[in-house]
Image (cartoon, rainbow, N blue to C red):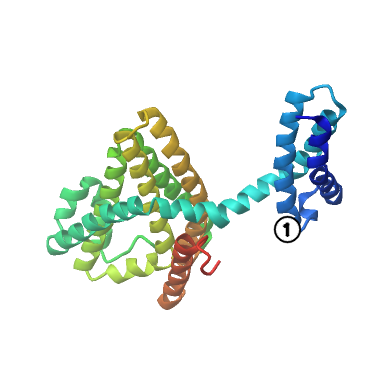
């Protein structure tokens, strides 16, 4: 390639890129959306031109010019602070809901692995309360005695709600990470966590139903339950997704399949932490409060519908 032809062919793009870079004054946010798109497009072309110049004209001044131009544009596009914010915003605008939909079959399986044992345990304990010991062991005895005395354990005094909220949050995040980490056991630990938590909730509701106290617990979980349980089901789905890749790697090695799927699952798990923080605050302050149950139900309905509408519709061009 002749140097003169090369310069004549590409110089307009370089000049435009230089003008946009100067306009930005080192900050991509100073450009309009169209200008930023053009800047990125021209940057890619200039970087390709620089590679050609370094190969064919390594000592020519045009190579030094392109190197400086690409360097200045790179600094505009990839300012560390701006880039982090853009990545954070893009993740929640696009990536998080897209990844959720990708794992939806696994999340649905996680939901069923929780729901079916819960229904069975509810029916069994409702009919024969002593079966709760068979399902959950003798450690449940203190809770059973509390219920038999006609009391619920969900009352949280206003003075300790702040610390209770922190404890609840820590516990919820722990359950989420254990459900995901269970994938490394081939999914066995994930299955255990989902099945046991389903059995526990179902058995406790069955015990309360036998004593006519189930509405009290239902009222307590109305506000925070939709978001909290949805995130738990998602974390279980992440565990099943990674375990499936470990057990059925396809054309990949097991290690490669594990790494690839874990990258996806970790993004979903970390992205869900703010959701659990919100659910923990609701559980610590609104759920045990004296607000009427319709208000708590409205909180749960609004947050639950908003979350699933975001997960299922965001990024589809519907209601964005």
Which residue: 41% across, 73% down?
297
Quadrant of the frame with the C terminus: bottom right
Which residue is the site of mark 1? 34
Residue 32's image quarter? bottom right
| Residue depicted at x 80% and y 48% | 27
Question: Does residue 157 appear in the picture of this structure?
Answer: no
Q: Of 24 and 70, which appears nearest the observer?
A: 70
Question: Residue 272, percent across and down?
Answer: 49, 51
Left or right: 244 in relation to 47: left
Of the pair 123 and 45, the residue shown nearer to us: 45
- The residue shown at (24%, 59%) is 202
Q: Secondary structure at mark 1?
A: helix
Residue 194 place in picture, x, y as percent? 30, 49
- Residue 276 in percent (x, y) is at 48, 54
The quadrant the N terminus occupies is: top right
Would residue 271 be visible to someone looking at this image? yes
Residue 211, above or below 96? below
- Work out whether residue 66 or residue 263 is closer to the camera in this orientation and state it: 66
Would you say 275 lies left or right of 155 here? right
Q: Is residue 293 above or below residue 273?
A: below
Q: Quadrant of residue 212?
A: bottom left
């Amino acid at each position: 390639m002749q140097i003169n032809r090369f310069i004549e062919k590409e110089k307009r793009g370089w000049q435009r890129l230089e003008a946009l870079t100067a306009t930005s004054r080192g900050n991509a946010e100073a450009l309009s959306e169209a200008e930023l798109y053009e800047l990125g497009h021209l940057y890619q072309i200039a970087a390709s031109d620089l590679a050609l110049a370094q190969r064919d004209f390594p000592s020519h001044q045009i190579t030094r010019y392109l190197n400086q131009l690409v360097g200045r544009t790179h600094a505009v596009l990839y300012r560390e602070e701006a880039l982090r914010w853009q990545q954070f915003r893009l993740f929640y605008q696009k990536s998080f809901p897209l990844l959720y939909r990708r794992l939806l079959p696994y999340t649905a399986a996680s939901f069923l692995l929780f729901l079916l044992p819960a229904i069975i345990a509810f029916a069994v304990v409702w009919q024969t309360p002593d079966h709760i010991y068979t399902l959950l062991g003798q450690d449940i005895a203190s809770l059973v005695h509390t219920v038999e005395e006609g009391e619920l354990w969900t009352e949280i005094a206003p003075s300790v709600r702040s610390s209770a909220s922190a404890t609840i949050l820590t516990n919820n995040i722990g359950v989420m990470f254990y459900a995901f980490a269970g994938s490394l056991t081939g999914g066995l630990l994930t299955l255990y966590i989902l099945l046991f938590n389903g059995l526990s909730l179902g058995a406790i509701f069955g015990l309360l139903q036998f004593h006519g106290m189930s509405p009290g617990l239902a009222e307590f979980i109305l506000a925070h339950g939709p978001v909290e349980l949805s995130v738990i089901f998602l974390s279980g789905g992440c565990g099943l997704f990674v375990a499936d890749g470990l057990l059925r790697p396809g054309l990949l090695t097991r290690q490669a399949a594990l790494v690839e799927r874990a990258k996806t699952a970790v993004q979903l798990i970390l992205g869900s932490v703010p959701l659990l923080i919100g659910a923990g605050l609701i559980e610590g302050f609104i759920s045990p409060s004296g607000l009427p149950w319709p208000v708590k139900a409205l909180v749960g309905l609004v947050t639950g519908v908003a979350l699933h509408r975001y997960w299922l519709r965001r990024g589809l061009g519907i209601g964005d």
